[in-house]
Image (spheres, rainbow, N blue to C red):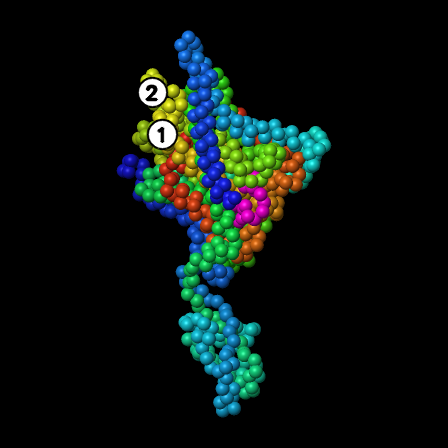
């Protein structure tokens, strides 16, 4: 189809360029988050993430070192180096000043005239000379603007994981997700087999029921099921959320698996039955292994759905901070307490989306297959 | 007990319990209740065959009934009672809710969401599907546009908080405004239009879903129809709109309705971006405002959502039944 009539080179170019444009448009927000999560918090505040590969101009304040005070020709002089005294070995002064009102009014190498006949000279490498006709009793301030090189580190991740309990939330999410993914698969697989390969009155009605339940908004279940959980003693707990996720995941599980199982070749199943296999054996030895792709599809769906869920976790888990999952932690805690701390927020978000992204990119094939089986009729 | 241990035990008990239930119930059925012994061997086998499907179905049907069927009735019943749940007030929750201006805003906003999000996501999905169809690097492009599907709504909201940030050194939108000399603006506080900025997030997520399904549908179009159109001198646009789109109309409708249903359920984006402030409330987030505070009102909102979803549900069931016959 490459060289068929109707395909013009100009059109090809237009297609390529528009796809590039769309892909960039789709990626930019996520890339921004990823880059920001590795940046120094102070750099985030003064330079945009798309400028992050370049040095950042920042304003600093330092104190001249009074220990170096000497008297020379009737002038009191302090000499030193801003960077070595500040603990940084290198850097370069872009501009400096001796007063808060003009922190970057003088070029390096020039001399700034200050109040009370004092002067300040700072070289580009940070060497400074501060002079005063009168005795200097308090260490004078030196303001300077300096270019700092791009600063990428894992600091944000360290902070969020150690002091903000995000590690706890990560484990909580994992704890919710894994049982809530495995259990519905088993239950649904048996039901799907019955709906696909066993003959009994009412089968059509049950299939229709499952299809109908696919779209029931789970908002309906929140109040009555929480009440029921409280009544039978489960309350807001992990057990409660596992049961809830199992219930909410079943319609899609049964639907996907049944659609797949119906498509398995009839000959295999019938010849097994003729050879004396029971339904239980047919299911465990033939249908289940053959249905692996559908099982994988649903497992990925359910995993992503439970991992990313906020609503069910807010309702069915206790609301204390020890049982927060990551989505609740971000939405209810970090957005408030760390609202302006963009680096920390970015790191937190990236921790919460890293696992789904890995699952997504490694098992995309099954996800796509599941989507197609679940939607295209 | 630490949650991890609890989780591991649950997996073992859950999986073991399921396997044990299915295995043992089959065993009991075949060996104890209807043993195929001499005399009524044939009759017993037949009886066992009649009972077995229900053994297979029981756990699933029980869970579905409990977690999805019972709540429809339970929620409706609860919505007829007052806040404390001890006084029957008929449709009092509904009438006070419809009179509440916040509910009206939420309802109208949700209507906007239902109009815009499925349409845009389906349109963009179709566009990308068509553009990448014959592209050598089409699969990579599709994979990247599909990626937001894996990201949680909360994560996506945070990602877009960066884009919308007020500070021109963080938010791209304000950086562009800054570049042309305009003052920074908080897009989430512009009345009415802020809704659209929130919708963008869901469109960003759902376009990939629409694209994957529509892309498969485009691949499924018989090649001859396209070739015939080319021979007849149709240009690429005519081929797309007059040959391809009509053939995948069924799939487009399915994608459209699936996203519509989703729009009625997602509260995370509004919750994480504005908390429903600045007139951005939609029904699911409006419901969460009352959850834990006024169960009567919360269930009433949930039931309104259910009624809006109902036509789609009926249509889905009819389609499914048609297919089976």
The foreground one among A32 and A366 is A366
Marks 1 & 2, CB-CB < 8 Å contact: no
The dot on residue A272 is 2
Q: Is residue B48 left or right of residue B284?
A: left
Tell me where residue B119 appears, x and y as whole percent.
49, 37
Q: Secondary structure at mark 1?
A: helix
The quarter of the picture where residue A114 lies is bottom right
What residue is shown at x 47% (from left), y 38% (from top)? B9
Work out whether residue B283 or residue A17 is closer to the camera in this orientation and state it: B283
Which chain hosts label 1?
A: A
Numbered circles on residues, count: 2
Circle 1 residue: A289
- Please say whether residue A93 is visible from this viewpoint: no
Most extreme residue toward the top, as rendered? Answer: B39
Q: Residue at x 65, y 32 (%)?
A: B79
- Residue at image position (39%, 35%) is A296
Distance (Cα) linking label 1 and label 2: 14 Å
Q: Earlier in the sequence, mark 1 or mark 2?
A: 2
Q: Position of residue B201 (x, y in %)?
A: 50, 44
Q: Is residue B47 above or below residue A148?
A: above
Q: Which residues are magenta?
A: A313-331
Residue A327 is inside the magenta segment: yes
Q: Is residue A263 left or right of residue A242?
A: left
Mark sitting on residue B172: none
Residue A17 x/y as whole percent: 37, 46
Magenta segment, principal secondary structure?
helix
- Circle 2 sits in a helix, a strand or a loop, which is it? helix
């Amino acid at each position: 189809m490459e060289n068929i009539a109707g395909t013009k080179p100009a059109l090809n170019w237009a297609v390529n360029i528009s796809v590039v444009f769309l892909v960039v448009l789709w990626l930019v927000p996520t890339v921004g988050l990823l880059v920001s999560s590795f940046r120094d918090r102070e750099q985030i505040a003064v330079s945009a993430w798309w400028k992050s590969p370049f040095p950042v101009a920042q304003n600093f304040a330092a104190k001249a070192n009074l220990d170096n005070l000497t008297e020379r020709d009737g002038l009191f002089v302090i000499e030193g180096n801003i960077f070595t005294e500040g603990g940084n070995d290198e850097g370069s002064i872009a501009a400096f000043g001796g007063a808060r009102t003009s922190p970057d009014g003088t070029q390096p190498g020039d001399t700034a005239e200050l109040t009370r006949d004092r002067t300040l000279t700072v070289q580009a490498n940070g060497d400074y000379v501060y002079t005063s006709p009168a005795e200097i009793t308090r260490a004078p301030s030196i303001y300077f603007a300096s270019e700092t090189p791009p600063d990428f580190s894992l600091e944000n991740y360290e902070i969020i994981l150690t002091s903000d309990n995000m590690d706890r939330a990560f484990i909580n999410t994992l704890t919710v997700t894994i049982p809530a993914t495995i259990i519905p698969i088993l239950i649904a697989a048996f039901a799907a087999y019955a709906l696909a390969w066993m003959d009994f009155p009412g089968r059509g009605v049950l299939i229709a029921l499952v299809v109908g339940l696919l779209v029931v908004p789970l908002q309906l279940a929140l109040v009555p099921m929480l009440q029921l959980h409280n009544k039978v003693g489960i309350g807001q707990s992990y057990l409660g959320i596992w049961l809830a996720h199992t219930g909410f995941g079943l319609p899609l599980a049964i639907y996907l698996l049944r659609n797949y199982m119906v498509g398995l070749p009839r000959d295999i199943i019938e010849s097994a039955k003729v050879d004396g296999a029971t339904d239980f054996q047919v299911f465990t030895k033939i249908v289940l292994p053959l249905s692996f792709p559908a099982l994988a599809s649903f497992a990925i769906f359910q995993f992503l759905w439970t991992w990313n869920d906020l609503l069910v976790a807010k309702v069915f888990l206790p609301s204390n901070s020890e049982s927060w999952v990551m989505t609740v932690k971000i939405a209810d805690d970090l957005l408030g307490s760390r609202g302006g701390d963009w680096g920390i927020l970015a790191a937190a978000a990236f921790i919460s989306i890293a696992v789904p992204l890995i699952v997504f990119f490694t098992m995309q094939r099954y996800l796509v297959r599941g989507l197609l089986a679940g939607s295209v009729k | 007990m630490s949650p991890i241990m609890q989780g591991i035990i649950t997996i073992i008990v859950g999986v073991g319990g399921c396997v044990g239930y299915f295995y043992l119930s089959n065993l009991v059925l075949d060996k104890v209740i209807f043993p195929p012994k001499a005399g009524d061997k044939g009759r017993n086998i037949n009886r066992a065959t009649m009972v077995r499907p229900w053994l297979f179905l029981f756990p699933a049907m029980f869970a579905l009934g409990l977690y999805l069927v019972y709540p429809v009735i339970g929620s409706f019943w609860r919505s007829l009672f007052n806040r404390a749940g001890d006084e029957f007030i008929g449709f009092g929750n509904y009438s006070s809710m419809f009179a509440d201006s916040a509910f009206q805003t939420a309802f109208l906003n949700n209507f906007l969401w239902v109009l815009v999000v499925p349409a845009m996501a389906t349109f963009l999905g179709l566009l990308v599907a068509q553009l990448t169809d014959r592209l050598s690097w089409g699969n990579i492009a599709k994979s990247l546009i599909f990626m937001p599907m894996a990201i949680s709504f909360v994560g996506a909201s945070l990602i877009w908080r960066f884009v919308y940030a007020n500070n021109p050194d963080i938010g791209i939108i304000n950086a562009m405004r800054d570049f042309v000399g305009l003052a920074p603006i908080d897009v989430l506080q512009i009345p009415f239009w802020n809704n659209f900025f929130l919708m963008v997030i869901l469109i960003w997520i759902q376009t990939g879903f629409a694209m994957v399904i529509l892309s498969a549908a485009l691949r499924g179009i018989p090649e001859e129809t396209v070739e015939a159109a080319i021979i007849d001198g149709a240009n690429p646009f005519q081929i797309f709109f007059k040959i391809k789109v009509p053939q995948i109309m069924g799939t487009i409708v399915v994608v459209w309705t699936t996203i519509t249903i989703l729009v009625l359920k997602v509260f995370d984006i509004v919750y994480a971006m504005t908390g429903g402030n600045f007139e951005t409330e939609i029904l699911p987030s409006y419901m969460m405002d009352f959850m834990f505070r006024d169960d009567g009102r919360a269930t009433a909102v949930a039931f309104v959502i259910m009624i809006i979803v109902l036509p789609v549900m009926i249509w889905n069931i009819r389609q499914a039944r048609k297919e089976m016959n």
